[in-house]
Image (tube, helix red, strand yellow):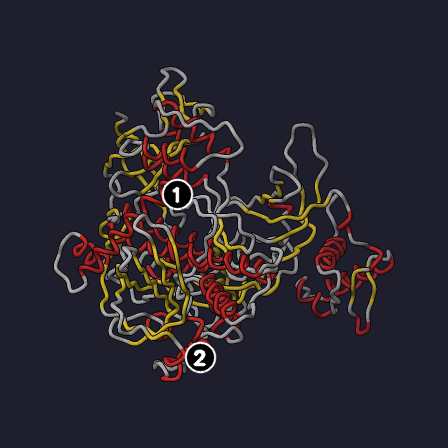
Amino acid sequence: MSKSKKETFEEIILDILKNNPEAQLPFDVLQNILKVDSNQDNNRLKSAINSLFDRNLIVKRRGGAIQLATSNGNKSNNKNIVTGKIDISRRGTGYLITEEFDEDIRVKSKHLGMALQDDMIKVELFDRGRGKRREGKTIEIVERGRSMFVGTLKKKGKQNYLIKPDEKSAHTDFFVLPDNVREAQPGDKVAFELVDWVHPQSLPEARIIEVLGKEGTNDANLLSILAENQIKAGFPEEVEAYAENISTGVPEKEIMRRHDIRDKTIFTIDPEDAKDFDDAISIEMLDNGNFYLGVHIADVTHYMPRETILNEEALNRGTSVYLVDRVIPMLPEKLSNGVCSLRPNEDKLAYSCFMELTPNGKLVGHTIEETVIHSDHRFTYEQAQEVIDGARSAYASEMKLAARLARILLNKRFQEGSINFDTPEPKFVLDENGKPIDVKLKERLFAHRLVEECMLMTNRTVARHVDELRERSNKPTTKDLFPFFYRIHDQPDLDKLKNIEDNVKPFGINFHIDSPTVSSKAINVLLEQIEDTSIELTVNDLMLRAMAKAEYSPNNIGHFGLGFENYAHFTSPIRRYPDVVVHRLLKSYAGGQPSYSYNELKQLGTHCSERERAAIDAERDSVKLKQVEYLSQHLGEEFPGVISGVMESGIFVDLKDIHCEGMVRVSDLDDDYYVYDDKQHCLIGRNHGKKYQLGKELRVKVVNTDIKARQIDLTLVDDG
């Protein structure tokens, strides 16, 4: 028997109140929510309210408002209720990720309620049949996971607007009132925020906060990636205004207060298109045969006090974001490319770390000082490499000395346990509209290594410095004694390492995992064995995925990947907020006063790690977008490739020379019926026994691309 309209009204009212137990809903608000526009429906609504009141399910408040009765209770103590983060698939099915169970809890679309992607929600579990997956339904939105969504504006009728969200942003359409459309036009990609969502049977309401551009344009595509990852491109007007008011000159009073090293030979090495130079190098040989390395870092904290809107914006961003064709800076351009940037032939404020190193790379002394510098020359990586290789330069002796030290430090680091990852990255040649016309692999020069080793040594030294402060204090070591902000990296995932062990075994490579931990030496031996083989890129990628994510924390557990006991980020405060924190800590300890507590650093660590992951995801998405756009121009063309992944649904193929990955679906392997063997991690033909496994070289054709989903479909041409 179908429900009456009055009964439907009762259900909707109760649902709304249960999701907002403290709310008092006026009668006219209920009329709008339920779209009551006739006397008959008005009477049904009054009748529904009276029925709920008579059954003690609601209470009436002054002015005719209603509220959920307190006797209805809070189910939070029910053991069948769990809290977690919801991940919603493209098909609209939710999967609750919770610490209470190893397996995710499935929440079907009809039971999602008003949950959106990444929300923290409470789910009531259904009775579970034997052998069946846990399922449940949303009963409460604890916290919204996203402040920003992205989609395309559509117009329905004269005054009705809808936003069709991107698949990665949300699973349901939103409606927009005309007053909240701003200057957006139908067909525009927009970033928007949730205003309200009153009932699962209605659409959520949105407010447009930024117009990203016409759907399908380069700007719209890339700005959409930022919005998907909760990143805004532009700065608020008040932040830009604050930055513009910062003086560009260096006051004489500040020079007098600092160590003036403007007479030292100092140079920078950066990418050709870089403008934010936040590190510079000086080097000399001491009379005792030791190296004296100076690494000079832009003194951002001098221009950015903590209690300012500039600092608040930088903290919220957490990091700069490097997309394929643009940089979304952490600091406004006035600072990142101007005031703070260590540009050549300009006096600049710096925070410098001077290190004395023996001929075998051992640190025997250091100081950390506020300085004034004057960079003499700006090198690109390519120009620096030419000097390293013998080209004439006024700075050739310093460059070759730095290269000599870098080789010593590099060899020492690998001997002591650093993992030697060297994964190639694609580099796109774009036309004036941002369209990719060519893709190459970035060339790795020793000049890159030179800068890297100097920065690693500096970051390691400042972390050791705090250890020495603790030792000199003669106090029992506690978490509150000189708290510091470390860059940490935990042990890798053993299950993923076992997967690598299984995958390399067919190639005669013995990578054996038989203990709770693995040594970096064993990983380096494996990486050496696969060098210049068909599985090199794939295993490198699998190994990177097996690694724990590096994070920021005051709890120092060391850095597994680098093999360092103490490590922090100090050398890039223009583009990373953790470096700003480290600068403040070091300055405050030099002045005898801590600037952050352990608990403050713990919260900062969580936030900065999250913002870093969002930036990395956005950067990867922008690369994938350009790969798909590039191959969209090469439909029907054939490429050599190597199998980089195998699943039940098909094989992933990495296209050689351009490092783009696409998929051959198992349904397109029509010469046999293929079954996935999870022990051998391969697809095996049931009738003929042909195998498709990691590292197999083959030839494929590009048959389809989906720019919105950022997917590439391939078919097999020749499997060798």
Is residue 103 visible in the rendered image? The answer is yes
The answer to whether one can see residue 151 in this image is: no
Q: What residue type is labelled 1?
A: Ser
In the picture of the structure, the residue carrying the numbered disc 1 is 418
Name the residue at 71% across, 45% down. Answer: 124
Secondary structure found at label 2 = helix
Q: What residue type is labelled 2?
A: Tyr
Say which mark, if any, is on residue 254: none
Q: Return the x and y of residue 458 as percentages of the image width and height.
A: 38, 58
The alpha-carbon separation of the residues under discs 1 and 2 comes to: 42 Å
Q: Where is residue 13 in the image (x, y as percent from the top left)?
A: 73, 58
Crowdedness near tag 1: few (<14), some (14–19) or many (≥20) residues, C-alpha within 10 Å: many
Left or right: 341 in relation to 306: left
Q: Where is residue 303 in the image (x, y as percent from the top left)?
A: 43, 76
SS class, disc 1: loop
Residue 622 or 558: which is nearer the viewer? 558
x and y percentages locating residue 611 in the rendered image? 48, 58
Of residue 399 and residue 720, the one placed in the foreground of this image is: 399
- Seen in the picture, residue 111 relative to 694 is either above or below; the reply is below
Q: Residue at x 69, y 64 (%)?
A: 36
User: Is the N terminus in the top left, top right, bottom left or bottom right quadrant?
Assistant: top right
According to the picture, the residue beneath numbered tag 2 turns out to be: 242
**What residue lies at 22% left-to-right and 50% top-to-bottom?**
438
Q: In terms of depth relative to the viewer, which is nearer, 420 or 197?
A: 420
Q: Which of 625 and 313 is in front in this view?
A: 313
